[in-house]
Image (cartoon, rainbow, N blue to C red):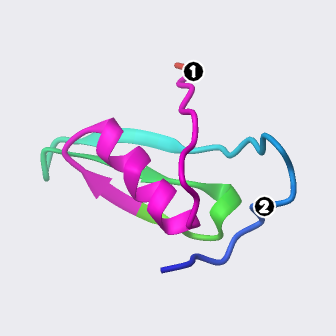
C-alpha cells in the first residue's frame, strides 16, 4: 500500500523525520512522520516500525539512523 508523501524517490539518499515514542498504555512503540503526510503506525519494536515504513514506501531497504533529542 502506497502512502502519499513529500518523499522524493528520485533523490539518492532522502532523509525523512520520524517521531518514535513508547506508549505505556498499549505497551507498543508508536511512530509518525511530518514528511509522510499523516503516516502513523505502532509495533512492538523500533525495528518493526522501520520494516512497516519500508513496506509503506514500497522500497527494498533503508538505513535507519536514530538521534535522541
Crowdedness near tag 2: few (<14), some (14–19) or many (≥20) residues, C-alpha within 10 Å: few
**Image quadrant in which you'd find residue 65:** top right
Q: Where is residue 54 in the image (x, y as percent from the top left)?
A: 50, 55
Which disc, if any, is residue 9?
2
Q: Which residue is drawn at 77% across and 45% down?
A: 14
Residue of label 1: 67
Mark closer to the chain start, 1 or 2: 2
Where disc 2 sits, the SS reads loop
Where disc 1 sits, the SS reads loop
Q: Which residue is drawn at 49% across and 67% down?
A: 56
Considering every residue shown, the one lying at the far top of the view is: 68
Q: What stretch is highlighted in magenta?
A: 41-66
**Image quadrant in which you'd find residue 50:** top left
Q: Where is residue 68 in the image (x, y as percent from the top left)?
A: 52, 19
Q: Which residue is drawn at 64% across and 64% down?
A: 36
Establish if 12 lies above or below 39. Answer: above
For marks 1 and 2, give the one nearer the viewer.
2
- Asked whether, in this view, residue 24 is left or right of residue 19, the answer is left
Is 60 or 18 nearer to us in this picture?
60
Amino acid at each position: 500500500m502506497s502512502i502519499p508523501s513529500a518523499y522524493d524517490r528520485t533523490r539518492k539518499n532522502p532523509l525523512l523525520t520520524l517521531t518514535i515514542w513508547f506508549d505505556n498504555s498499549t505497551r507498543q512503540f508508536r511512530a509518525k512522520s511530518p514528511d509522510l503526510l499523516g503516516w502513523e503506525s505502532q509495533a512492538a519494536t523500533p525495528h518493526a516500525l522501520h520494516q512497516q515504513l519500508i513496506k509503506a514506501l514500497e522500497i527494498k531497504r533503508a538505513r535507519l539512523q536514530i538521534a535522541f533529542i
